[in-house]
Image: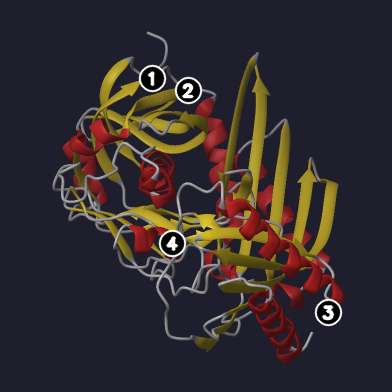
Amino acid sequence: MEKEYVFDLLHEAVEKGQKLGGEFIEARYDDLQLTTINLTNDIIKTSSSLHRKGIGIMAYYKGTPGYSFTPELTNESIEDATIRAVKLAKSTDVRNKIKLDFDDLPAIKDRKEAGVKKHPKNFEFDDKLELLKRGVISVKEVLEPTSTVGLYGESYGEKYFVNSEGSEIFWVPMVVDLRMGAIVIKEGQQAGSYEGSGNSKGFEFFESEGLPEKVGKEAGEACKDQLNAVAAPVGKSTVLVSPQMGGVVVHESFGHLSEADFVVTGQSPISDRVGEQLGSEHVSIYDEGVTEYGGYYLPYDDQGVKTENTILVEKGILKGYLHNRGTAKKMNAELTGNSRAINFLFNPIVRMKNTYFGAGDLSFEEALEQVGRGVYAIDMSGGQVGLDGNFMFNCSKGYLIEKGEITKAIKNTALSGNILDLLKQVKGATRDIEMRTGYFGGCGKGGQNGLAVGYGGPNVIMDQVLVGGAQ
């Protein structure tokens, strides 16, 4: 569809909303293509291709929002959606106890084309299936699995945004992802593993990283190690968390506490604590839209705000929160570009971008030596977190660290604690940062599950982590 035609439709919606009495109108159009392939035991179990497109209208009246949407790109449907949004804002205003108006901004005119080298749309289904087959071959070169599963996922498209200030923004979202899993049953024992990675790149991501073979080999080796895994030591221990594990921990247990919609309502335990020392001097936490390390590419949020590298914690000191335009004004804070929705079906709410621990000054070998004796936690599968900062994550892939070296694999075990206590126990981090994103899974909040985010960081040393397991 022609860009100018889409922008004209959005401008018409904005003008209509203002004539109806909306004090501020935002209109956005999402056009997303999603493809999934599941190869289980060398058989295509499922494959799907979805085309999801539509327009969302947000109207504001006296600091109260009203949202409506339509999948039909006709003038009549868009007008109806705009009318509903304005009516909802006006009717809800009398019951809204927290008004979130915002300051005017200069109009933004920006169009960012796809920067990928090899766009997935230019590759056939068989090319994508071949990636999974290559991964399975690499699994089988390591061990004889009882079963294997390979998952391929891609999401790409176009996003348009227009508002009452005259902003006109276009950008291209992109995620490709590949996962490999293996299960082996041997002599009454069962072991399994699941490896993979995604990024906001094109098909070149798989080629430059040699990804199918790398992921398949890692899945096979991890599965093989699990056959001889030992129980993790019970009690508090020093834990070295990998970039992916640390990224999940900081996202789930701290990132959500920093989202300003929780902060302004007093639900977060870090409300009104900017300037306080929450962690050790080794703790810095960032939330960034476009990183030099990869992850998820997000140049603008769904309020048309340019994303920033937001410093949440610097050397242990809380510096700020994640905002949409309304919470930023209410708290007299800088904009951070954190108003996001999964797609046009949902209204934007405060969500993370790419959240990660900052780098330290250790090499990986120096980090192991500093731990001495403890656990290397590499990956997780599920867990629980609360708005009080308490967390429990299931460490699905980990190893013992003995005398500063990685030794035996450990069985699935729980890592738990309170993030505000744990941040005080961070003893160091490595220099190198790794970031990733994913097509599968994603962040969940407010009924909007599966939002693409980036996560990662360095390897981080955490002391006094409660490790579960059998004696």
Bin the neighbour count of mark 1 within 10 Å (Cα to Cα): few under 14, some 14-19, many 20 and up. many
Q: Residue lying furthest bottom in this view?
A: 4
Read off the residue under disc 4.
Answer: 326
Residue 70 picture location, percent across and down: 79, 65
Which of 441 and 237 lies nearest the eye of the viewer?
441
Read off the residue under disc 2.
Answer: 411
Q: Nearer the viewer, mark 4 or mark 2?
A: 4
Q: Please, what is the three-letter code of the amino acid marked with disc 1?
A: Ala
Bin the neighbour count of mark 2 within 10 Å (Cα to Cα): few under 14, some 14-19, many 20 and up. many
Q: Earlier in the sequence, mark 4 or mark 1?
A: 1
Q: Residue lying furthest front in this view?
A: 94
Which of 26 and 111 lies nearest the eye of the viewer?
26
Read off the residue under disc 3.
Answer: 75
Q: Earlier in the sequence, mark 1 or mark 2?
A: 1
Q: Are marks 1 and 2 in contact (CB under 8 Å)?
A: yes
Q: Please, what is the three-letter code of the amino acid marked with disc 3?
A: Asn
Q: Quadrant of the C terminus?
A: top left
Residue pictured at 49% horizontal, 85% vertical: 108
Residue 329 picture location, percent across and down: 36, 64
Q: Are marks 4 and 1 in contact (CB under 8 Å)?
A: no
Residue pictured at 72% horizontal, 42% vertical: 149
Q: Are marks 3 and 4 in contact (CB under 8 Å)?
A: no
Read off the residue under disc 1.
Answer: 232
Residue pictured at 67% horizontal, 23% vertical: 185
Bin the neighbour count of mark 3 within 10 Å (Cα to Cα): few under 14, some 14-19, many 20 and up. few
Residue 46 picture location, percent across and down: 84, 47
Give left or right: position of 192 versus 49.
Answer: left
Give left or right: position of 68 versus 373.
Answer: right
User: From this viewpoint, is residue 186 visible?
Assistant: yes
Q: Earlier in the sequence, mark 2 or mark 3?
A: 3
- At mark 4, the secondary structure is helix
